[in-house]
Image (tube, coloured by chain):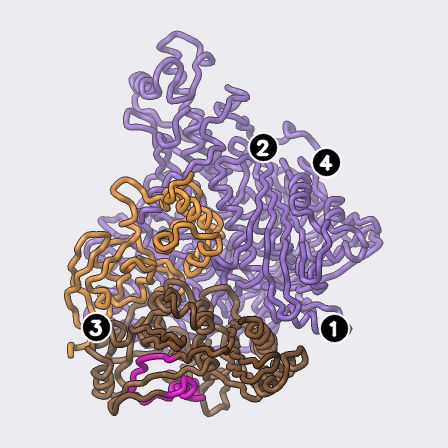
Amino acid sequence: MSAGPEAWAGRRLGAGPGGDDEPGAAFRVVGKALPRVDGVQKVTGATIYADDIELPGMLACVLLRSPHPHARIRSVDATAARSLPGVTAVLTSEDLPIRFGPLPISQDEEVLASAKVRYVGDPVAAVAARDEPTARAACKLIEVDYEVLATVGSIEEALEVPVDEPIHGDTEIGNIHRFVALEFGDVDEGFALADHVREDVLFYEGSNHLAMEEHSATAVFAGDQLTLWSSTQAPHNVHRVLSKVLELPMGHVRVVATPHGGGFGGKVDPFAHEVAVAKLAMVTGRPVKCTLTREEVFYNHRGRHPVLMWVRTGATRDGKITAMHFRTALDGGAYASLGVATTHYTGALQTATYAIPAYRFEGARVFTNKATCGPKRGHGVPQPRFGLEIHLDKLADDLAIDPVVLRQQNFVKPYTRTVNGLRITSSGLEEVTEKVVAASAFRRRPRPVGHGQGFAVSAYLCGAGFPMYLNRMPHSEVNLKVDRGGVTVFCGATDIGQGSDTVLATLVAEELGLARGDVRVVTADTGLTPVDLGSYSSRVTFMAGNAAIDAARKMRAILVDAVASRGGQPGAAVRVGDGGIGEVSFEEAVALAEEARGTISTSGSYAPPKGISGRFRGSGVGPSPAFTFTAAVVDLDADPLTGEVRVNKVFVAHDIGRILNPVLVRGQVDGSVYMALGEALMEEQSYRKGLHHHPSVLEYKTPLALDMPAIETILVETIDPEGPYGAKEVGQGPMLPVVPAVVSAIHDALGVWIDEVPVTPDKVLRALDQRAKGGEGRVGPRRFPDIPYPPCTKVSPDAATASL
Amino acid sequence: MSPPGSSRVVRLSVNGEPRETIVAENETLLEVLRERLRLTGTKHGCELGECGACTVLVDGDQKLSCLLLATEVEGAAIVTVEGLASGPDLHPLQDAFMELGASQCGYCTAGMLMSAKALLDENDEPTEGEIRDALSGNVCRCTGYASIVDAVGVAAARLRGER
Amino acid sequence: MLRLPVFSYLRPGSPVEATQMLADHGGRAKLVAGGTDLLPKMKRRQLAPEVLVAIGHLDALRQLEVSPSGAATLGAGTTLSQALRHPALREQQPGYLEAVRVVSTPALRNAGTVGGNLCVDTRCNYYDMTEEWRSAIGFCRKAGGEVCRVAASSPRCWAVSSSDTAPMAIALGATALLAGPDGMREVPVASLYADDGAAYLALAATEVLTALRLPASEGWRSAYQKLRRRASMDFPVASAAVALHLDGPVVDGCRIVLGAVASHPLEVPSAADLLVGGELDDDAIDRAATEAARLAKPLDNTDLSFPWRKRMVKVIVERAVRQAAGRA
C-alpha cells in the first residue's frame, strides 16, 4: 500500500513562494525567528482581553449555579431578586428554552436548567445588575426548590442501573451516552497468529485546561443586530449557537473572539454565559458582561476525559504486532460536549504510528454528575497513547526485545493507509525516533537505582478532516484586500496565543514579497472575516494557512499581471520580492492594478481533500490531511524513600513538516511538554461526592517555574506535500509521548509500573511496598468493567480504504 | 469609625504619574487599577493570591495587587506593565520577551514582567535558579516557563551592557 | 471577579490602641497586616469581619534587632522578605530563615509578615473554599456548620496548622511578645496555639502579637524539612523542624516540632528524647523518626494522601536531623 507523494489526491500548493511559478525560490520571511505580530501589545499591557472591555452603561451578569450534583428543579422563584435595587433583569429557563451543544447530534445543553441540574455549577438563573456585587447578592435571593437525586460519581457507578433516574433521557442505555464498536481486518485471526498475547488495564485521570484567563463575554444588542465579544476559540460555533437559541438570523449576529488568555481546548464549546449575556443585552437594551470566577471555570470545564482503558495485543516472537483490541470507557461528566468525537479519538490514532494489521476498538462514554468533559490539548488522544505506549513497553519486556526496536519494527510507513482507513502522507516517525534516542543516549548509560529514562512515540492530526456539522463548504476562508491603503488579511481563525495571526501574516508576506510588518491581520470576527471553523485539532496553520496562500497567490497573479501588462512583457518574467513587483515598487504595482481593475481583493479557501478516510459509520473522526509524528525521551530521578519524581530533562523530536517561525514552534513544544508533565505528575480534576475536590489555582496542582526541567527540542522537516509550504502542526503532537515516557522512566528507575496518571508519590511507594512483599509492583486499575458494547461493525479493508 | 464600605480619596503615584481617586475601603489595588484607573494591563486569574497574574511593583517590591487594600497603598509608588516602557522604547525585558516568544497568550505576561523587573532591580546577574525562584509565584500555562526564564536572562545581560 | 465584602477599616496609632479597638468590637473585628491570609478568606466569605484593624503600618511592629550575641527580635509586622534580606539575621538565625524562605512565593513573602505567618489560619480542604462550594456541603464546623467534614463523628475541628515558621520558632525555643489591655507579656511560641482547628490560637481576643524573639543559637544547630507538591507556593503537607545541641558526638539537647500534621505545631519530645544522651547513629535517628511519625496524625484534608504524609514524617525527620547535625 505504498506510493509516492505524487500519487496522493490532495491539492499541491508547491513548496516555495509562488508555488510552481517559482520552484526553489528562497524564503524571505518563512523560517525566520521573528517576534509575533501582536508582540508589542502583549508585553506592554495594551492587548484588550475580553474582561478588559468596558462599555458605557454596561451591566454585570452573574449566573446562579446548582449546588447539587444531581437534582430535579421543582421551582425557581426570582421575585425577590428582581426587586433588589440595582437589578435590571433576571432570566430563568423559560426565557431561553432552546437547547444547544457543539455537535448537531448532541444538543443537550440548556442555557439555564429547566427540569433538572446535572452537576455542581449547572446554571439555573442569570442576573444582570449595575455591578457584580449586586448581581451576586441577587443570586442569593433566588429561591430554587430542588429535589435531590442520587449522584453518579464514576464510570463504575454510571454502568450500574440508575438509582433514581438516568442523568439524561436520550442515551444508549442507562447512563451510557455513546458506544463505538468497530473492527478492521480479522482480529481473531490476528490473535491466532500471535506467539504472545498481552493484556493491560490503565487509567488516565481528567484534567482542566487552567487557562490563565477566566472566560468572559460581553454582548451589545442595537437595532436588530447582536454583537458578542468573547474569549472563545471558535467564534463560528458561538455564532451558530447564538443564532439558534436566540432565534436570530446568522446575519444579525456578530461574534468577535477577543485576544485570548489561553484556550487549550477549554474555549471551543459554546457556553451558557455567552448566550445569557446576549439574551440579557436583548432584554435590557444595555451592554452586559459576564466574567467567570476561577471556580466557575472549573465547573465550565470541558477538560480532559478520565479514561479507563483495556488493551490486548498479539505479537509474533520477534515483535511484529498481529492484532490489537482496544477498549475505552470515558467519564464524560454531565453533558455531551464533543464527547462523541472524543470517544472515537480514543480509538482512532493507535494505528497512525503502528501498522496493526487487524484492529478492534470498543469505546463507551458515560454521563456522570460532574463538570462536562470535552476537548483538551490532544483531544481524546493522550489517554490511549499513554495506555498504548506503556502496554508496548511491557510487551517488549515480555518478548525481551528493546522497547525502541519493538516499536520501530511496527512503524507505519509514509504514504500508506492504515487498517482503519487513515491516509498517512509525510512521516518523520523513523527520523524523530533515531534522533531522540541519539540525543538522549537512551538507556545507553548505566543508570543507578532511582534514575530512569523512558521513551515513547505518537502521532497527531493537522486539523480534523471533517467539520463539526456536516457540510461541504470550506473549513477555512481568507479574504485578502490590497489597495492604496495597504495589505490586510481577513480570516476567521482565532489566535489563542499559539500565534496563528503571525502565521497568516508570514505566509501572505512571503507570497507577496513583502516584509511581515507590511501585512495587517484582521481575524476572528464573524462580522468582518470569512469563516474559519476555529482553533482546535491543530488545524489553523494547515487549513487557514493554505487558505491564506491560496488568496495570496491569486493576488500575486493580479499584481504581476498589472505590471506585466504595462511593460508588455510576459508575467513569467516579472519577479516578486523585496517589496517590489518586477521593476516597480509594490505600491506602484498595486496602483496599476487598482487603475486597471478597481477594488482588488482575492479570496482563498481550504477544504481537506477527499479520500483521506474510509467509508464507514464513524470514519469521520481521525482522518486528517496530514499527521505529525513525535518521539520523546524523559530522563528523571525517582526517590525510593518518598516516591517523589524529579524530571531532569525531556528530549522531544517532532516532525513539523516545515518550520514557519522557530519562535512560535519552540513555544508550542515547550508548552506541550509542560502540560504533559503536569498531567503525568500532578493535574487532577477530581471529585468527592460530585463536588470538585479543589477548584482553585493553588490546589489544582500544575508545575511552576522551579518544577520544570530542561527541554531539548529536535525538529525534523519532512516538507508535507499539502501543508502550507510543507508545514504541519506543533501545538498538540509534542505533548503526547511525554506522559507515557514519564511513566516508563519511573519503571526504569524503580522497577514499578504506575498504570495510571497522574503518578503521585504515594502511588510510587505503594507499588514499591507491593513489590517488596513479593507482589507485582504495580499500581493501577485492577480490572476493566463489563460494558455491554454492541457487536462491532466489521469494516472490510475495501471499505476502510475506499475514498469518499 | 466610618461605616462599612465607606469610600475615601487616595493618592498614588502610578507609573510616575500622581493619581488621586476615590476608592471604597474594601477595594483592592487590582480593582482600582483596572476599574477606576482603567489600566487593564494588570490581569487577574484567581483574585486569591494564587496565580501571580496581578503582580505589580509597590515601592519597588513585587506584590499581588489582588491582596492589597487600595487604602493601604496611599502614597506608594506603583508600577504596572503600562509603566515599563519609556515612551515608545520598550524595556529590555519587554524586548526579550517578544524576541524569545516568552509571551504567547500574554495573559500572565504583565505579572511575569513585573516579577522579573523586581528581580533585576535587585540582582543584575541572576542565575537561572534565581530567575526561576523570582517567577515561582507566577503561573503560565503556555510556555512551560522556558522562554520566559531565557528572556529574563537575556534582558539581564543586556541591562549589564552585554550582548 | 472575587471581591471583598464590606467592612469598616480602622488604623490604630499603636499596638495598644489596636488592642483597645479589638476590645471595643468584640469578636467582630480582625487584625490585618500583610493580608495574604485574611483577604483571600474574606473573598471566599470564610470570614466576614465587620471591622478590620490594620497594624501593618505600625513602626512599633517593624523593628528588627539582632544583638551581638545573636538573639533577635523581629517585629510582628516585619515582612518575611525583610527578614530574609537582613544581613545580621542571616548571619545569626539561619534556621528561622530556612523556614521563612520556603513560605509561599516571593510576592507573598513581600507582603506576608513574621507575625502573620505565626498566626496563619489553620487550613482544610473543606474550609478553604468559596461560600458557594461550602454551601454545597452544608458548611463545616470551622465556619457556619456543625460537623467536621473530615471527621464527621468528632466533636472538634481538624483543620491543619500550616505555618512554616511556627514549628521552627518552637524548635529554636523562641518566644512571642503580646500586647493586651493589661500590658505586655512574653510567652513561648508554642503556647500561642491550641489543639483545635477552629479556635487555633490561644491568645486572648484582645491581644496583639507584637514581636517574635529568637534566642541566640549558642551552639544549637537546626534544619527545616518541608514536604509539599511543588518547589514553591504550596503550604506544607508535613514538615519537620529540628534543633540539636551536641556535646562532642553526644546529643545533649534536641527539639523536634512537626508542622501540618495536627491543628497546632506538634512538638514530639518523646522522639527528641530518643536522641538525647547518645550519639547520632543511624539506629537512634531511625528510632526517633519512627516515634515522630507515630505521633503525627494527619487526616484527609490537605493535598496528597494522608497515609503517605504520615509515613513521610519519618523521612523528613530523619533528613532534618541529619541536616542539622551536619551544620556547624
C-alpha distance separating marks 4 and 2: 21 Å
The subunit carrying tag 3 is A
C-alpha distance separating marks 3 and 2: 64 Å
At label 2, the amino acid type is Ile
User: In the rendered image of this protein, does residue C22 appear above or below residue A748?
Assistant: below
At label 1, the amino acid type is Ala
| Other-residue count near label 3 (Cα within 10 Å), few / some / many at <14 / 14–19 / ≥20 | some
Q: Are marks 3 and 1 on the same chain?
A: yes
The percent position of residue A119, horizontal first and vertical second, equals 46, 69
Please tell me which of labels 3 and 1 falls first in the chain. 3
Does the magenta portion include A231?
no
Q: Is residue C63 left or right of residue A440?
A: left
Badge 3 vs badge 1, beta-carbon distance below 8 Å? no
Q: Is residue A735 left or right of residue A184?
A: left
Which of the labelled discs sits on residue A83, or is there none?
3
Q: Which residues are magenta?
A: C187-213
The percent position of residue A60, horizontal first and vertical second, equals 26, 62
Q: Which residue is mark 2?
A: A719
Q: Which residue is mark 4?
A: A1
C-alpha distance separating marks 1 and 4: 50 Å
The subunit carrying tag 2 is A
Q: Quadrant of residue A533?
A: top left
Q: Residue at x 45, y 56 (%)?
A: B130
Chain represented in orange: B
Q: Which residue is mark 1?
A: A772
Please tell me which of labels 1 and 4 falls first in the chain. 4
The percent position of residue C271, horizontal first and vertical second, equals 58, 85
C-alpha distance separating marks 3 and 1: 68 Å
Chain represented in purple: A
Please tell me which of labels 4 and 2 falls first in the chain. 4
The subunit carrying tag 4 is A
Please tell me which of labels 3 and 2 falls first in the chain. 3
